[in-house]
Image (cartoon, coloured by chain):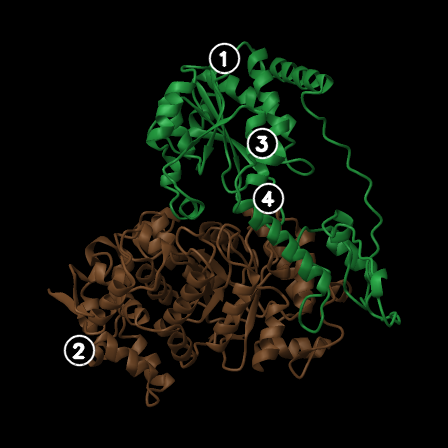
Amino acid sequence: MDDAKLAAIVEAIVRELKASGAVQPSAPTAAPAAWTPSTPQTFSARPSSFGGSLTIDLPDPTAPEARLTPRVTNAKDSNGVRALMASTSARIGVGRAGPRYRTASLLLFQGDHAVTQDALYRDVDQRLLDEFNLFTVQTKVSNKQEYLLRPDLGRLLNDEAKRTLNEKCQKNVNVQIVVGGGLSAAAVEANLRQMFPVVRQGVQSAGLTFGTPFFVKYARVGVMNDIGEAIKPDVVILLIGERPGLGRAESMSAYMGYKPKYGDTDADRDVVCNIFENGGTNPLEAGAFVVQIAQKMRQHQASGVKLKMAK
Amino acid sequence: MLLRTKLHGKTYEFPDIRLLMGKANEEKSGDRLAGVGAETAAERVAARLVLAEVPLSVLRETPAVPYDQDEVTRVIQDAVDESVYAEIKSMTVGDFREWLLADTTTPDMIRRTSDGLTAEMVAGVTKLMSNMDLMYAAKKIPVTAHCNNTIGAPGTLSSRLQPNHPTDSPEGIRAEIYEGLSYGSGDSVIGINPVDDSYGSVARLLDMTYDVIKTWNIPTQNCVLAHVTTQMKCMQSGSPVGLVFQSISGSQKGNESFGISVGMLDEAYELAKKHCFPKGPNFMYFETGQGSALSAEAHNGWDQLTLEARNYGLAKRWHPFQVNTVVGFIGPEYLYDARQIQRAGLEDHFMGKLTGIPMGVDACYTNHARADQNAIENLAVMLTAAGCNYFMGVPMGDDSMLSYQCTSFHDAPTLRQLFKLRPAAEFEKWMEDLGLIRNGVLTEKAGDPSFFLKR
């Protein structure tokens, strides 16, 4: 089957899924709430007593147009500041309070860092895992701290996990999908509902067998080797949360390997990264894309560098 | 060799210098990962008690990687000034610590002694120092260097303008440069970490930054932190290069994982002296960081602090303009939290200065480390008190390309004003002439990137 044909099939699946309501199409970007930059250069007279009348009801400072609000006071060329800001995602045109940051910029930074930290230190919502009937197994890591400290242990399934996979999973399937929280629970939560059904439907439409899906707690990418050894699938797809950037915790990766086994490295794997809506690889498209890659891996019986050479 | 002590009635014995050195370190996750960290807090102190009695000569004779197996060891050992070494070799590590801190020991005396030291001696004494020891001793050892301006002079604090962009967009980078210059960042270097390491892309960024430097007549230098071989090609092809950069490691095997060797850097240094456009005589820029050798499994079983000290001994060979550790970049497997990052930052700065190189620090953290911006601001304050030559200047400390956080454009003027420091003298004069700074304080014109839109 050639690529164009495959792409057409996958596209048809996505259309079908959308029509049946199995996946939600990406919501059109909501009209931004009116954003009024604060202009604290002059202080208006304040009521002497706020009493019970105080109402603070703020728009989201992380909205794109809020982020792009210039905060330089008395700029030589205020349109110029806007143009400079538009040329980069770096935090410029932020102005200053003495030599320090203005309050809005300081709190925006802290908000971005906070959402990143929260993504890192919590687990994926159990309800989401239940929704997709994902049972949970664990690596040799026993807690979050150890997960960060011992990447080597996150690459190995614990003994109970191996037993559980042996009991519950269909062996020698064509495609085995596995979910891991990785370094961002938020990434899995943001993308799984869109991506998972596309992959399942795509695999089944292509006439391939779809293995019993499950969740691995405290997984690193290298755990694919143990999974390959335990279940012996043709292709393993690991959906895993990426290390969060500042204010971007929703980015997920799909790591893929053909018949992963002990000793395989990143050179034996393929990855679709930066999976997130609005700016990254859209999760629906990513789902279609990984099905295509899985097909290619089976066709060439290879993944990673070997697959590149085969093409 | 017997390495043994009692502590609170319990006996602790260490099989060799390698493990003694590992166990004497402040707690670091990377030393645990390498299997050389102390098992208990008491064992850590016991190791220090023994290390304090070890003569410096023993550390010279026990390099982390044997002389015949490692060119980094050979560079460091061959550079030792034997007459200076003869004066200090019988001193114990504990006595050396006191000598460094003593009121009677002057900066000149320490600078002279630097030439008789090897990295293992530098690392050894660092393990016996408290945080404030590290600050106090480093402050005694100003190390200056000159390219188009002077870095590291007492009374100054410099800032590398780091205008990284997720796609190397010249317009975006130029915008960030304007923002940085308007805060007085850029007196160390305007240095870009490129996404694209190819010759064409690197040459384009060199041309663009050179254009800004020439248009505004800025007393500074540019650098695109690509692999050294790409920069060598740029020099040979006539691109305007200010500083030549490379990341280095504390062992030959580590450097091989970076695709470099001593011979290659010798060649780059010769090209730099011939082709770099600034006056010099210092043209090289190196970055280091605890844990990098371990992550490449190139640590030969030694602790990350000792491997880091070897970076500085190696860097000294090429008379760099600036060297900085990227202290929190490597992640929590090596430096777990703010406390470990802060400790490592103070250690690295001290070790660089004791080795005799112009040392700055990229005080930073990644999002999976237990750290935040407050922790990095704290570290920058401590390092400024210690006389650190320069920090990074990044828009609000949030690097939009490398996905890590460090010090900001705002931090440099804040630290200068807190500690009554100035930018590098030539750069301050330039800022004064433009009206961006007056008496060491930013003027009302500062902090406005549109200032640089029209000359």
Residue B147, image x, y percentages: 51, 71
Residue B195, image x, y percentages: 56, 47
User: Looking at the rendered structure, which numbered label has been put on residue A127?
Assistant: 3
How far apart are the alpha carbons under marks 1 and 2? 73 Å
Q: Nearer the viewer, residue A80 or B229?
A: A80
* Chain letter for the green colouring in the rendering: A
Q: Which residue is mark 1?
A: A209
Q: Quadrant of residue B63?
A: bottom left
Q: Earlier in the sequence, mark 3 or mark 1?
A: 3
Q: Amino acid at mark 1?
A: Thr
How far apart are the alpha carbons under marks 4 and 2? 55 Å
* Chain letter for the brown colouring in the rendering: B
Of the 4 image quadrants, the one containing the C terminus of chain B is bottom right
* Chain of the residue that carries numbered disc 1 in the rendered image: A
Q: Amino acid at mark 2?
A: Ser
Q: Earlier in the sequence, mark 4 or mark 3?
A: 3
User: Looking at the rendered structure, which numbered label has been put on residue A249?
Assistant: 4
Please tell me whether residue B160 is drawn above or below residue B141 in the rendered image: above
